[in-house]
Amino acid sequence: MAQQCYNSTTHDASTQLGNGDGATVFSVTRNKFTVVGCATLAYINGRNDQTKDYASGCVSICKNREGISKERTCNGMGCCQTSIPRGLNLFNVSFDQSFDSSAVADFSPCSYAFLAEQDWFQFDESVLSTEFGSRTNSLVRVVLDWAVRQGTCEDAKLDREGYFCRSDNSNCTDATNGSGYLCHCSPGYEGNPYLDGIDGCKDIDECKLEHPPCYGNICTNTPGSYNCTCPEGTDGDPTKSKCTAIDHGGEKIPLQARLAIGKSISITSVILAAMISYTIIKCQRMRHKKEKDSFFQKNGGFKLYEEMVSRKVDTIQVFTEEELKRATNNFDDKEVIGRGGHGMVYKGILYDGRIVAIKKSKIIDADQKDEFINEIIVLSQINHRNVVRLLGCCLEINIPMLVYEYIPKGSLFNVMFQGHCSQSPLPLETRLRLAEQAAEALAYLHSGAARPIIHGDVKSQNILLGDNFMAKVSDFGASQLVPMDETGFIAFVQGTFGYLDPECLQTRRLTDRSDVYSFGVVLLELITGKAAIYYDELGEKRCLASSFIMKVKEHKVRDILDDQMVEEGGWEIVGEVANIAKECLMVAGEDRPAMKGVAERLHALRRFKLHPWKEDYPDEIESLLGEPIYNSKAHTGTFHSLDEIKIDASGR
């Protein structure tokens, strides 16, 4: 258990736990990562049995005693919980040191973070005291899943010497939590499948069970099974009921008559089977068509046609499932060009030769189908050069699919951090232009479209690069497709770790200022050359927004900026971009600038970069750039990243 107490001289601010034997992993269904405290953000970092890195976090906020949850559940007010991935066998827990806990120290002096069995911990106000750690001796209960961690069943069977299912009467199933497999006795056997011979799986004599399977009739045990037979002179199904005596009354039927009857029955059976098969196939086709019609209606297809006619919209095309299957070679994995929280994206070629991007979206709430169709209409009419166009949709399947224009050169993230570019690194002028274009696109979505659209997941992966490196914002409008509850709040917080607006975590309300915060992180990526989540010189995983804010407080912003960018553009240019990013990261959304203002400032900054008139018009330069970030001391305690909710002058 990781523990951190306010003003304590000693505390265990991190903890690490792992399995050395490799055979066990932490149960994904029985354990939860739990954080306790009233001004606490804790991280869990780890890896699974395939050495894949994993990182997540959990934030718990309560400003006063009245803000502590009274429901005895971890709902983010005094306690929060999150799930862990499958295959996790090693993890480290740590606290974000930038949180200020002085305001809550009298009723929540300590913070705790641990991975434990979900049923072991029940939240109440008493666990916020210093006694919780001593009461549990800082020990928690976890549940482990065991398996043979040596490949899949298919792989293991190739090496009979190393195959652990030793019993001849055993079978193998792949593990559901992590890699490896488990052995089980075959049906009709019991014992230890990992042993061979008489010590392994043994036959169950069903006839000697307390409740035999045969209804008082003759039971014969067989290896792994049994047979039920009726005594002579009786007939029936002894597995379902007792056998009954055969009626011998009447005369015997002659042999020729019996043969004729048998032949007639055979012919009739063949004809009847053919008719049944034809009927089944016809019914399946009809049911498949009805199913498509049902999905089309459920997803608002008829509503879409009505809206297209009433609004005279011809910018949206309704595709059939068969058309999109042909376009993607039956959704071949080779055609996958993107995977994300909102769905999977395929590259496809339509019948007319157009190359498109086809996204399988999340399930749409049936109660929101009218809203979904309205959004399809609105999004299809967006015609901005820096926004990826929505071309059409497919509604005759359970999960609707959306069809977008295809952008060939990948994302800004790929170009900057994965080497997908011959120009590496990007020059400052290109970075400023991409920032301006992305800002103009978001400003258009917020205030220039037919109705305001909140992006909800602004990040460098969602800024695609078209011809001549023109920025194209993708995955816009995703937040409008999220089901809302009766209060109007989003049912869950979406976004990407490192870009997510921390105010949204507290209020559970997505606003246009949430996009502004995320765009501020993108600006930081452009001027620092670091990803939103990056590794420092010591190999430690860091949050870029958090690192930037700490440098601002220490008046060492130059330390985190890309030296090449400063050399190309000078401190006035790069420093002003950093100043804009700082304003985008303000703690309160209302203190952040609107995207329209951000776009205008970036446009003016590019003009100054292309046409420097600094020496002739110093007053206009000062008006353009404003107060530089290295002299600005205002609001240093009122902005934050995902890792910070409140920062006072002491940096706590």
Image: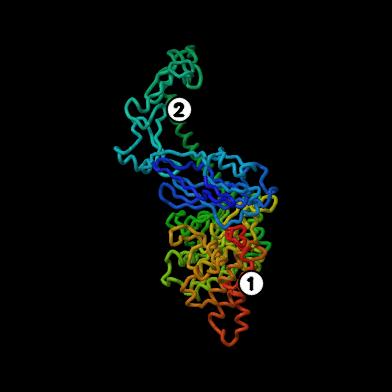
- The one of 203 and 114 positioned closer to us in this rendering: 114
Q: Quadrant of residue 473?
A: bottom right
In the image, is 435 to the left or to the right of 261? right
Q: Amino acid at mark 2?
A: Ile
Q: Which residue is mark 2?
A: 265
**Circle on res. 444:** none
Which secondary structure, mark 1?
A: helix
Which secondary structure, mark 2?
A: helix
Q: How many discs mark residues in the rendered view?
A: 2
Q: Point out residue 363 in the picture as x, y percentages from the top left corner.
A: 58, 51
**Residue drawn at (59%, 42%) of the image:** 131
Q: Quadrant of residue 502?
A: bottom right
- The one of 1 and 377 positioned closer to us in this rendering: 1
Classify 10 Å Cα crowding around label 1: few (below 14), some (14-19), many (20 and above). Answer: some
Sequence-wise, the earlier of marks 1 and 2 is 2
- The one of 153 and 367 positioned closer to us in this rendering: 153
Q: Point out residue 492 in the picture as x, y percentages from the top left corner.
A: 61, 51
Q: Point out residue 209 in the picture as x, y percentages from the top left corner.
A: 45, 19
Q: Point out residue 593 in the picture as x, y percentages from the top left corner.
A: 64, 68
Q: Which circle, 1 or 2, is nearer the viewer?
A: 1
| Whether residue 87 can be seen here | no
Q: Amino acid at mark 1?
A: Gly
**Circle on res. 597:** 1
Location of the C terminus by quadrant is: bottom right
When the figure is inspected, residue 303 is found, relative to residue 409, above or below; the finding is above
